Structure formats: structure tokens, C-alpha cells
Amino acid sequence: MQGYLLFPDGRALQGELIGAKRPQLGELVFNTSMTGYQEILTDPSYHRQIVVLTYPEVGNYGCHLEVSESTLGHAAGMVLRNLSPGSFHNRYQQTFDAFLAEIGVTAIIGLDTRKLTQMIRDEGPRNVMIVPAEIAVEEAAKDLAAAAPMAGANLVPEVSTQEKVIHGDGETHIVLLDLGIKLATIRALVERGCRVTQVPWNTDFAAIEALKPDGILLSNGPGDPAAVPGVRPTVAKLMDTYPTMGICLGFQLMALAIGGETYKLPFGHRGGNHPVKFDKRVVITSQNHGFAVHEESIPVDTCEITHHSLFDGSLEGFRMREKPVFGVQFHPEAAPGPNDCLDHFDYFLKQVNQHKGGGDA
Ligand SMILES: NC(=O)CC[C@H](N)C(=O)O
């Protein structure tokens, strides 16, 4: 089916629609990963975003149900250069096209993704629409003009679990505040001997305390961190009471809870090759964020800045000096991307177990 990618200024780029083949609206962003299209598509942090994949050939290894990162949230749409004519992999279950249709997402193919990426880099992200050809530009333009921008959008309630879910049966009990969690994070904890209780984003401190956690994980998630209402006091109390690790949105909420500030990046960090300086190491990280924490807003008397992006120097992590609490802006769970930082989960659990044993963290 023919269709087009519509911009707010009326530009309409023609392409072919695959997957659900219905209109989709979202913020246009790009991801530079060379593989991992299924994980990117099913990462709830991409909720209400349309992702341009810069890698030109997509779909060559198909899809497998177990590779999905969530069933609760996913990208609104995708923009691809070429869809592979065949899919070959020993775990192949279905084509990318069939998978897109199954989860109700439309992708547009045949566009100049290199040019689009440069456009996003130079002009910044903005809302766009993927539209089937039978819908007139003027009609779609009305919906596009009415759409709210990403800055100020609280999207967490749309992707968080509605009820408590327990994963694993290990000795260490982690309560996971679900802001749009990826399954790879849960796996990383369960594989390291944890029982994980996943709770809705708006669970209050008393309810979390009643679960008797050994540690807290604040998850990744979509939208503007400054727009998630009411959660800051809970996060502040959790950080005061328990060993805590924050990932991406969880990290941003930690910063806001201690009086820090967030801002929108010019075009975001999304890909599997982002170098981060951490101690005396350079780690290659998986990233997916459009907002960031102002380093100057972090109180250095109580916090130590630990990680920086080597692409633009922005803040990628801090830890608290006197508490077993830290957070990172990137994704140590990878999926997709390099596993250089899986040891951050070991560090977290070491802190959790020291705290549990009454020792110094
Ligand atoms: N992956 C995430 O948690 C993203 C956090 C936030 N929504 C951002 O874009 O910055």
C-alpha cells in the first residue's frame, strides 16, 4: 500500500506502507543501531515516537516472540530504507512485516533515511505522521497540528503495568517501579538471583515499604521526565531508604527528586555505539533518550558525577556519596546493543546485599 510521511510544514515524503498500514503519529527520532529492530520497536520508551532506522536493510533475520522487550508499549511507527526480501535465522518465527501487523504498528519503507537523519540532526525532532495514500494531506495535517509535543508529555501511565507482577524466586528482593520497563532489565536481575516485584508507576512509598524490598530499581520509560506527576516525593523517599538504581527515565527522576533539572537534547541519543567515560574506562553503551539531566543542577556535596557521554559531554550517571544509590542515563541491559555495562547490575546487587547484611555499602 502506498503512503506518505507528513511533516508539520506540509512536506509529504512518498513511500510504501507495511505492517498495520494505518495512520500513526509520533515524534520523529533516529536510531543508529545496526541490528535489534525488534527490540527497538518493542521498547516502551519509544511510545509515541516514530523511529528512523539509519541501518539501510531491515528485516533480514525476521522476528521471534522471545526477542520482544515488552507487550505493554512500543514505538508508534518506523521509517526504513529497505525491507529485506527474505528472513533467515535459526530462531526465525515470522517476518518483520507480519510482526508489525500483529502488534498494530505501521512502517513506511523506501525513504532516504540518511537525509531524514540529517534533517532531524539539523532541525531537531518534531511530530510527524505516517499516512495511507487514500487519506488526503489536508485531513491528516489537522491531526498532526493538534498533536501535543513530546516536551511536557507524561506517557508513563500508558505503558506501566496495571498490577503487581512477580518475576523469579531468588533470595534478593528487588521492587521495580515500572515506568515502561524492558524485559532485558528484569532478566538481568533474575539471572543474578533476584525475585523482582514489578509495581505500577504510581505505587506509593508505604505500599512499596510493605513489600519489604532489599533494593529498588527505577526503570526506563517514555515521555518527558519533568511531566511525570507526583512521583518525585516517592522516589526521594526510596533513595533515602533503600539501595536504588535508576536507568534512563528512572535516572532522570532520581535527579529531579534531589532538586536537579532535565532538558530536551537537540536530537537525542539513540543507538548501540555511544561511548561513555566512566572511571578510567570507556564503555560502549546502548542508548535511547531525548531528555537529559543538567550536570550543574546535581548537588556535588551529596552526589558524585560518575559517567559522561563522549559524544557531547552530557551527564550519563551519578552516585550518592553517602548512600548506596546510583543511576545511569544509558541502558546497561543493552537489548539491543553492547553488554559492556551489565556489570552495573552486579555493582547494584553488591550494594543491595551489603546493605541487607548490615555492612557498609
Ligand atoms: N529510555 C528512556 O528511559 C527514555 C527516557 C526519556 N523518555 C527520554 O527520552 O529521555
Image: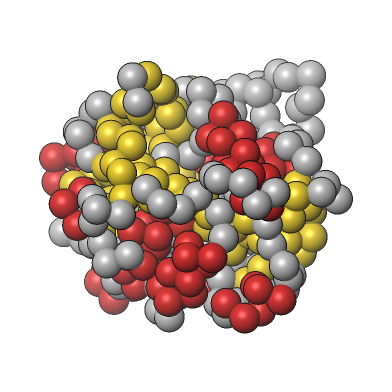
> Which residue does the image show at 32% across and 65% down from the upper left?
258
> Which residue does the image show at 36% across and 67% down from the upper left?
257
Query: Residue at the right extreme?
Result: 169
Say which of 168 and 22 sits in front: 168
Decide: is 118 above or below 107: above
Query: How many circles with numbers are drawn on the protein?
Result: 0
Query: Residue at the front extreme?
Result: 359
Q: What coloring was used for the rendering?
A: secondary structure
Say which of 152 and 262 sits in front: 262
The image quadrant of residue 261 is bottom left
> Which residue does the image show at 33% across and 59% down from the upper left?
255
Asked if residue 147 shows in the view, the reply is no
**Location of the C terminus (image quadrant):** top right
Could you say where residue 253 lies in the image, as x and y percent from the top left? 39, 62
Decide: is 6 above or below 140: above
Could you say where residue 254 lies in the image, as x and y percent from the top left? 40, 60
Could you say where residue 126 lies in the image, as x and y percent from the top left? 25, 56
> Which residue does the image show at 41% across and 52% down from the upper left?
322
In the displayed structure image, the side of residue 182 where residue 125 appears, left or right = left
In the displayed structure image, the side of residue 319 where residue 45 appears, left or right = right
In the displayed structure image, the side of residue 244 where residue 226 appears, left or right = left
Could you say where residue 83 lies in the image, as x and y percent from the top left? 53, 29
Asked if residue 250 shows in the view, the reply is yes
Decide: is 126 above or below 30: below
